[in-house]
């Protein structure tokens, strides 16, 4: 189930992109994971 959800999200983002207004408001999930990795490595 999770894999299908991830594939659907990837397909939607590839087709439509990540909206600028959403990026300014909450950022992109890849940056969230980058932030989390940075904090956990310390």
Image (tube, grey):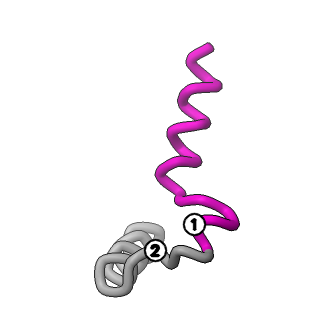
Camera-nearest residue between 14 and 24? 24
* Residue 37 magenta-highlighted: yes
Q: Which residue is mark 2?
A: 18
Where is 42 relative to 13, above or below? above
Residue furthest right as drawn: 25
Residue 16, percent across and down? Answer: 37, 86
Q: Is residue 19 left or right of residue 21?
A: left
Q: Quadrant for residue 25, please give it.
A: bottom right
Mark 1: which secondary structure? Answer: helix
Residue occupying the point 58% across, 48% down: 32
Camera-nearest residue between 25 and 39? 25
Tell me the tag on residue 5. Answer: none
Instruction: Verify CB contact (< 8 Å) between mark 2 and mark 1.
Output: yes
Mark 2: which secondary structure? Answer: loop
Q: Is residue 13 left or right of residue 27?
A: left
Q: Which residue is mark 1?
A: 23
- Crowding near the residue tagged with mark 1, few <14, some 14–19, many ≥20 C-alpha atoms within 10 Å: few
Q: Quadrant for residue 14, please give it.
A: bottom left
Report the span colored magenta: 22-42
Camera-nearest residue between 38 and 3? 38
Q: CA distance from mark 2 to mark 1?
A: 7 Å
Where is 24 relative to 30, above or below? below
- Crowding near the residue tagged with mark 2, few <14, some 14–19, many ≥20 C-alpha atoms within 10 Å: few
Residue occupying the point 35% across, 73% down: 10
Residue occupying the point 64% across, 25% down: 39
Residue 11, percent across and down? Answer: 32, 80
């Amino acid at each position: 189930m999770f894999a299908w959800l991830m594939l659907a999200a990837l397909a939607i983002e590839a087709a439509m992109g990540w909206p600028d207004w959403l990026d300014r408001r909450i950022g992109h999930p890849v940056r969230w994971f980058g932030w989390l990795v940075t904090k956990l490595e310390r």
